[in-house]
Image (cartoon, grey):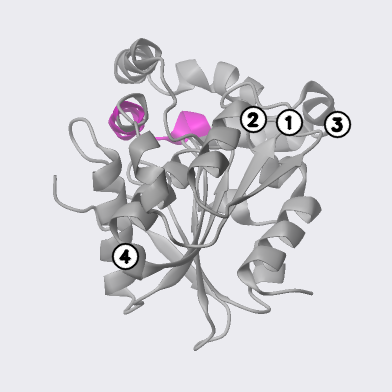
Amino acid sequence: MPPIDVHAVVEGPEGAPVVLLSNSLGATLEMWEPQVPALTERFRVVRYDTRGHGCSPAPQGDSTVDDLADDVLALLDRLRIGRAHVVGLSIGGMTGLRLAARNPERVDRLAVLCSSAHPGNPDAWRDRAATARTQGTGALAEAVVGRWFTPAFAEANPELVTRMRGTIAACDDEGYASCCAAVGALDLRDQLDAITAPTLVISGADDPALPPEHQEAIAAGIRGAALLTVAPAAHIANLEQPRHVTDALLAHLGGHR
């Protein structure tokens, strides 16, 4: 499948080191808004919408993680960026892992949040893709957002939860299903030892979607990787624990406050 010309927003000082932020399945580049102010003090920040999400076009048919990585390379080439720090959450982290293993010359430092090298349950992902295609992503929104935040956080932040539920429902049905196929087929376990980029792995202690053992396996497979667990936090840890995650990213990427 040819690369998708994904939608991106670029902020921060020209000439600064580049940080690329890759969103979760069902989210958009807006999910990184809590991190942007601090990151743009030190870095040129590139946020983009994964194919089929936000303002990015949707492919027809199933995607693979290589397709997602190719989208990133095409974006970097379009922006004339040779090398970048890569930060991704969930499917964004999977994209970062594949990119770092396959194209190490393009990845400086890597941060992988609430992600997995092998999510498993391919039947469940096929079922989710089928629901998106036949009933629309709105039929998935309530269940998905229920895994994104801890109950206490969701109760305290109803407007955010409502907004994120709307983001899921607004995803292109085919684009969301296409990305579900990429997640369901993913197995990067034998590629982790090929990653040479200094890597930070972040877990949400209360993540029901991809529990901490998934991140523990990533950290164990990448030589020298650091593992951080934030709590309380479910799947979208950067929104539930924004200061903790932002500080960890700054420390890892070299942009200490």
2 or 1: tag closer to the N-terminus: 1
What is the spatial separation of the Cα atoms under label 2 and label 4, in whole angstroms?
Answer: 31 Å
- Disc sitting over residue 156 in the figure: 3
The reply to whether dot 2 and dot 1 touch (C-beta < 8 Å) is: yes
Q: Amino acid at mark 4?
A: Leu
Residue holding disc 4: 75
What is the spatial separation of the Cα atoms under label 2 and label 1, in whole angstroms?
Answer: 6 Å
21 up-or-down from 181: above or below: below
Residue 73: x %, y % from top left: 29, 62
What is the spatial separation of the Cα atoms under label 2 and label 3, in whole angstroms?
Answer: 24 Å
Q: Amino acid at mark 2?
A: Pro
Q: Quick one: SS at disc 3?
A: helix
Residue at 41% across / 45% down in the picture?
Answer: 192
206 up-or-down from 52: above or below: above
2 or 4: tag closer to the N-terminus: 4
Quadrant of the rendered image containing residue 176:
top left
- Tag nearer the camera, 4 or 3: 4
Residue 171: say if magenta. yes
